[in-house]
Amino acid sequence: MGVGTDDKSRAGQGARLRASRALAGDDGCIAEARHFATSFLDQARTGHEVSVSARAQDLTQLVVSELVTNALKYAPGPVLMDLRIDDGTVEVAVWDSDPTVPAARESDPGRIGQHGLEIVMRITDHLSVQRESVGKRITARLPL
């Protein structure tokens, strides 16, 4: 995987980096997405001198896992994932083919499952959903 940069003269926390991956939607897709995110953050840290905390690495993997899992569960077809680093944040965007905007359910400790979006909302600084001409894009932003 190569990490693209929008401005090679900027290093460290202000670096603008981007990487994308199309995911086939098979059983190994979620693990592949987590591995891709980890590799992206590792390359940002080692190749571009971006400070990435262990907590940011773990939370990014969790967000990727939850968003990709939901995309696979509710939308037919491929999933696209876009990762960006800009000004001390990592942005995870996941596109799928279902235009239905998800809604987090009320907190219920007794409910088994369906807590993914609720978790993502609590651990991110920003979460947005955009309908696209085909499907939707969910974007989450976390501090590094």
Image: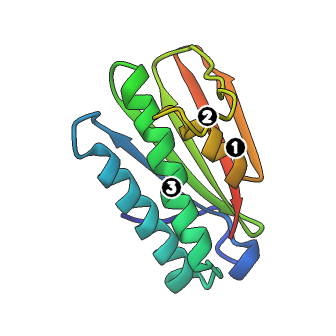
**Towards the viewer: 69 or 13:** 69
The alpha-carbon separation of the residues under discs 3 and 1 comes to: 12 Å
Q: Is residue 57 left or right of residue 90?
A: left
Real-space CA distance between mark 2 and mark 1, rounded to the nearest whole angstrom: 11 Å
Query: Which residue is pictured at 58% across the width and 42% down the height?
Result: 93
Q: Where 31 sits versus 130, above or below?
A: below
How is this picture coloured?
Answer: rainbow
Which image quarter holds the C terminus? bottom right
Q: Nearer the viewer, residue 45 or 3?
A: 45
Q: Label 3: which residue?
A: 62
**Is there any visible trace of residue 66 in the rendered image?**
yes
The quadrant holding residue 36 is: bottom left
Residue 76 position in % (x across, y down): 35, 18
- Do the residues under discs 2 and 1 have CB atoms within 8 angstroms? no
Indicate the secondary structure of the residue bearing disc 2: strand
Real-space Cα separation, disc 3 to disc 2, in angstroms: 14 Å
Q: Which residue is mark 2?
A: 138
| Rendered residue at 52%/47% (across/down) | 82
Q: Residues within 10 Å of mark 3 (few under 14, many from 20)?
A: some
Q: Is 36 rendered above or below residue 22?
A: below
The residue indicated by pointer 1 is 121
- Of the numbered discs 3 and 2, the one sitting upstream in the chain is 3
Amino acid type, residue under disc 1 in the picture: Met
Labels 3 and 1: the sequence-earlier one: 3
